[in-house]
Image (tube, rainbow, N blue to C red):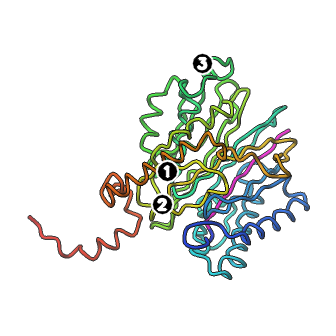
């Protein structure tokens, strides 16, 4: 059975600064999606948030880039903005809605999108990741490399007949708007040469070399490149399939047990360690960080999203096994901010600050420079 999994997110207003989605925003989104399911447009859905981002997970039969599904998501974001965010005077209402009129696809309009059309297997577990206060390449390049290319992380690359064929990575040049497919392990070094520059290159898809099926898909939207100015961090999402010809759930989660450094946090202008956490703790407050990442486990059954308790998925980072990662993340965050403050490398390099509010400060000084 062919099913499309669509994960579409947007920051459309937050409670108490860039902090957390208001319950009324989630309530209205649920009501609209419930009507869509009852009318037959959707097979199933689940609404959640990571920090101040409203996340819409939907299953359907329309394929990727469907104007019906993208139009539905756009309408939800618009209605929630008008009926809830602006009514409650939430901060940065409609922040990610960078265009006025829907053009058939929300890509390039502000919201982040990760979609995959799959042939549902006899058992179809998958994990949804969502991040707040960071960027696509910064959030996902390193863990996707470790999950699908590093045998020190993923034992299946060595001992599984399906996984030892490796994976092919689709890498986006987010500045030039083009992509390249790199087959690993044959082109492993070329892959690392690109994705190490996460501000320029971001992994968008991963395919199995065993049967060509899609293994993972990530959003790669860079809001500042669309708007031409800083309008908040990109807050990316990611879908990863698990088990059989794909890595096991434990292999997919393992890279997040040691907090790596990503851009974002305070004013989107600093490097901070990521913070894997439960849904309950996905609210950035400590210098608008550390960047939160949640991982939700689902089982797909004829397109339905099976959860553990009703529709509630497995909240995978709620596991105490990630307590040490959270402790180390806070320790690193405190060190970076209190020791380095506004000095690089704690603050992003100048090229990355081009789209923030820093140019407004530099504008005031432009006529005071004296040539040598």
Quadrant of image for the C terminus? bottom left
Most foreground residue, 110 or 253: 253
Q: Secondary structure at mark 3?
A: helix
Instruction: Say if the magenta span includes residue 256.
Output: no
2 or 1: tag closer to the N-terminus: 1
Q: Which residue is mark 1?
A: 174
Q: Residue at x 54, y 47 (%)?
A: 326
Task: Identify the residue at horizontal 48%, vertical 60% (top origin).
Answer: 225
Residue 9 part of the magenta segment: yes
Whether the residues at callouts 2 and 1 have beta carbons within 8 Å, the answer is yes
Q: Is residue 120 left or right of residue 246?
A: right
Instruction: Quadrant for the N terminus, please.
Output: top right
Q: Which mark is residue 225?
A: 2
The percent coordinates of residue 228 (x first, y second) are 45, 66
Find the magenta span and give its range: 1-11
Which element type, helix, strand or loop, lies under badge 1? Answer: loop
- Left or right of 117 in this view: 156: left
Q: Secondary structure at mark 2?
A: helix
């Amino acid at each position: 059975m062919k099913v499309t999994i669509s994960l579409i997110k947007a920051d459309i207003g937050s409670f108490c600064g860039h902090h957390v989605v208001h319950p009324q925003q989630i309530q209205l989104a649920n009501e609209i999606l419930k009507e869509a399911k009852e009318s037959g447009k959707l097979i199933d859905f689940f609404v959640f948030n990571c920090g101040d981002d409203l996340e819409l997970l939907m299953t359907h039969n329309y394929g990727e880039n469907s104007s019906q599904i993208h139009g539905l998501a756009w309408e939800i974001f618009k209605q929630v903005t008008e009926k809830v965010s602006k009514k409650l005077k939430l901060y940065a209402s409609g922040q990610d809605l960078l265009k006025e009129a829907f053009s058939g696809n929300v890509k390039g309009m502000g919201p982040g999108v990760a979609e995959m059309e799959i042939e549902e297997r006899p058992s179809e577990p998958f994990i949804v990741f969502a991040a707040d206060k960071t960027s696509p390449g910064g959030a996902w390049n390193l863990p996707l490399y470790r999950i699908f290319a590093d045998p020190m992380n993923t034992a299946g690359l060595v001992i599984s007949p399906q996984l030892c064929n490796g994976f092919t990575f689709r890498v986006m040049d987010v500045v030039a708007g083009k992509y390249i497919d790199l087959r690993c392990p044959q082109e492993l070094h070329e892959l690392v040469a690109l994705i190490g520059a996460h501000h320029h290159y971001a992994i968008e898809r991963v395919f199995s070399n065993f049967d060509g099926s899609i293994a993972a898909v990530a959003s790669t939207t860079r809001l500042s490149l669309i708007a031409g100015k800083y309008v908040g961090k990109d807050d990316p999402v990611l879908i990863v399939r698990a088990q059989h010809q794909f890595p096991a759930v434990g292999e997919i989660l393992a890279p997040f047990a040691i907090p790596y450094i990503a851009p974002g946090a305070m004013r989107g202008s600093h490097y901070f360690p990521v913070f894997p956490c439960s849904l309950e703790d996905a609210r950035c407050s400590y210098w608008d960080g550390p960047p939160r990442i949640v991982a939700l486990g689902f089982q797909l059954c004829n397109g339905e999203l099976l959860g553990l308790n009703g529709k509630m998925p497995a909240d995978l980072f709620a596991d105490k096994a990630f307590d040490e990662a959270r402790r180390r993340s806070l320790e690193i965050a405190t060190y970076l901010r209190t020791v380095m403050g506004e000095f690089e490398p704690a603050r992003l390099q100048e090229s990355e600050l081009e789209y923030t509010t820093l140019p407004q400060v530099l504008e005031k000084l432009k006529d005071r420079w004296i040539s040598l």
